[in-house]
Image: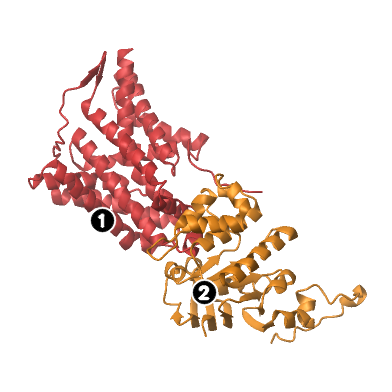
Chain colours: A orange, B red
């Protein structure tokens, strides 16, 4: 099957800390898949294992395989993976703050014989994010959080990816902006047939736009399925979507500890 | 007045030549955040290399391009063989590494090629240029103009696509990897270009004061230049160089007769000290952009 496939991936930081243990997931070509979970569950680590960015944090994939189509990714460095069409939009945006938005896009442009001309790619980014065009001459470090997120996504698009991985694009943004950005992500997915792997804590907004989702807890995938199925699941509703909507008796809450039954 | 002007002009021109020695330091710091304490020794090594090629009977105009090629490769290899092992290590290890390189180069190169001062004639001539009442050292004049051209060239370079990628890498290594920039290659390139700048500085200073190990002492004014100008700014290198050169020429010009000489080093040290106390980022050094 084309697309991204992780099989039984294990990541260890600093040779002692086991961050994810046996994560398997699939992102079929052209689909939007979400990886949901709370703080420290291993979402970002999973993405970094795919993009090859564990090195600077002294992390290592110690077991399992990561394949994209029929390419084995683990033997490649990060730039080769980008050249094969995998791009990672980092958590916290990480734009090049001292460069203008224009220069941010230039920096990400790969060039090469089979690449589309830079101007075409840049205009496409500005078509998705017209607001960036207005700010094209100011330093990216002074853009607003939403604009920086748009720039980070636009910068990733300039690399002409087949799969884009977004690490918490909603972080620190107003609900309105989250909606706008999610809308654009869905549009890009639909229009360019770009495969999307979305990592989020904002489960409610995410399950609205993706096809499938995986839940990760303590470094393990604990549940997966269609977005619609997951939305209906009572455990997901309780732990990720803020309750099932009924009234809660707060006197009882103290005594009520529902065991998350997927945890060992 | 003529005396003052003379000190001023010659100081400014010397300063530009300091800038050239400092340029390599800034390039490497900008790309990788590594303070290259071996820059002085690289300048010295570059001067030796150019002299070595001329001593083989080649003309200077052939020896300089050969020197450029050699030092470019030397820079690339330094990054590949030494610096790449240091990724993720504490900064102090990198600092000690470059310091060690300085010491090794300073011993090894004169050891193989001869420690006695060697003349390097680049065909400038000795007669001073006289404008009005002011005597200008011809070597300084040529050196200053060349330095200005090279610094201007590197400013233009940072506007190109490759230069933009280099600035991106200096901003954020992980984000650069994430969009497919080869951080290692860009840092290697910065070492290569620093090697080229070292050839410029080494040739000019070698022509002025002869080629021997004392050229590595250029590290001291070069560090003063980058601290004053801002350690990651090319404009800072230019302005810092001019200031260090002018102050280091005008003040000793009046004080040396009282103090018995060598006040230039005092001035340079004071520049470093005062900058660090009052403006640690330097004049043009960038502060981190923080959004609140």
Residue B133 percent coordinates (x, y): 26, 13
- What's the distance in space between the residues labelled 2 and 1, CA to CA? 34 Å
Tag shown at residue B279: none
Whether residue B114 is visible to the viewer of this picture, yes or no, is no
- Is residue A101 shown to the viewer in this render? yes
Image location of residue A38, percent across then percent down: 69, 72
Report the chain holding disc 2: A
Q: Which of A111 and A44 is in front in this view?
A: A111
Question: Which residue is disc 2 drawn over?
Answer: A50
Q: In this rendering, would B200 be left or right of A58?
A: left
Residue at (57, 55) in percent of width and height:
A126
Residue at the (44%, 80%) spot, across then down: A71
Q: What x and y, as percent, mark residue B216?
A: 27, 43
- In percent of the image, x 66 and y 79: which residue is there? A212
Q: Which residue is situated farthest in the left direction here?
A: B57
Q: Give the left or right position of residue A133, taking residue A159 as reference.
A: right
- For label 2, the SS is helix
Q: In the image, is residue B195 above or below residue A209?
A: above
Q: Toward the viewer: A11 or B64?
A: B64
Mark identifier at residue B73: 1
Q: From what the image shows, is residue A202 above or below residue B285?
A: below
Please state which of residues A202 and B245 is positioned toward the viewer in this rendering.
A202
């Amino acid at each position: 099957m084309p697309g991204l496939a992780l099989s039984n991936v294990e990541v260890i930081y600093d040779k002692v800390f086991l961050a994810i243990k046996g994560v398997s997931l699939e992102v079929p070509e052209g689909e939007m898949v979400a990886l949901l979970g709370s703080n420290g569950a291993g979402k970002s680590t999973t993405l970094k294992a795919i993009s090859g960015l564990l090195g600077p944090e002294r992390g290592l994939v110690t077991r399992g395989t990561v394949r994209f189509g029929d390419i084995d990714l683990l033997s490649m460095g990060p730039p080769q993976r980008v050249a094969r069409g995998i791009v990672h939009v980092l958590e916290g945006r990480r734009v090049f703050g001292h460069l203008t938005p224009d220069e941010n896009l230039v920096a990400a442009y790969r060039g090469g014989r089979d690449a589309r001309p830079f101007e075409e790619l840049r205009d496409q980014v500005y078509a998705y994010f017209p607001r960036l065009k207005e700010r094209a001459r100011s330093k990216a470090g002074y853009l607003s959080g939403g604009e920086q997120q748009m720039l980070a996504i636009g910068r990733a698009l300039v690399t002409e990816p087949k799969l884009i991985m977004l690490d918490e694009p909603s972080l620190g943004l107003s609900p309105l902006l989250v909606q706008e950005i999610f809308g654009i992500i869905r549009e890009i997915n639909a229009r360019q047939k770009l495969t999307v792997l979305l990592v989020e804590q904002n489960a409610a907004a995410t399950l609205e736009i993706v096809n499938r989702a995986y839940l990760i807890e303590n470094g393990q995938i604990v549940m997966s399925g269609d977005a619609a199925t997951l939305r209906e699941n009572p455990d997901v509703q309780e732990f990720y979507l803020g309750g099932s909507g009924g009234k809660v008796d707060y006197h009882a809450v103290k005594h009520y500890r529902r065991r998350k039954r997927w945890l060992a | 007045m003529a005396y003052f002007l003379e000190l001023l002009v010659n100081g400014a021109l010397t300063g530009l030549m300091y800038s050239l020695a400092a340029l390599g330091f800034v390039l490497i710091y900008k790309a990788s955040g590594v303070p290259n304490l071996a820059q002085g020794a690289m300048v010295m090594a570059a001067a030796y290399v150019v002299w070595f090629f001329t001593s083989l009977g080649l003309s200077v105009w052939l020896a300089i391009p050969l020197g450029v090629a050699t030092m470019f490769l030397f820079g690339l290899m330094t990054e590949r063989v030494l610096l790449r092992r240091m990724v993720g290590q504490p900064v102090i290890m990198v600092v000690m590494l470059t310091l060690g390189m300085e010491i090794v180069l300073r011993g090894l190169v004169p050891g193989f090629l001869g420690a006695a001062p060697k003349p390097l004639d680049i065909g400038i001539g000795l007669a001073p240029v006289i404008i009005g009442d002011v005597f200008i050292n011809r070597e300084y004049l040529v050196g200053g103009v060349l330095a200005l051209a090279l610094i201007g060239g590197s400013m233009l370079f940072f506007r190109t696509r490759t230069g933009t990628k280099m600035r991106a890498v200096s901003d954020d290594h992980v984000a650069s990897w994430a969009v497919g920039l080869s951080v290692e290659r860009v840092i290697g390139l910065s070492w290569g270009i620093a090697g080229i700048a070292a050839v410029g500085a080494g040739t000019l200073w070698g022509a002025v004061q002869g080629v021997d190990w004392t050229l590595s002492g250029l590290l001291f004014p070069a560090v003063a230049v980058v601290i004053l100008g801002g350690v990651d700014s090319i404009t800072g290198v230019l302005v810092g160089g001019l200031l260090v050169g002018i102050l280091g020429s005008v003040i000793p010009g009046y004080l040396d007769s009282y103090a018995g000489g060598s006040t230039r080093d005092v001035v340079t040290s004071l520049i470093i000290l005062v900058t660090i106390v009052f403006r640690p980022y330097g004049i043009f050094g960038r502060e981190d952009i923080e959004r609140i």
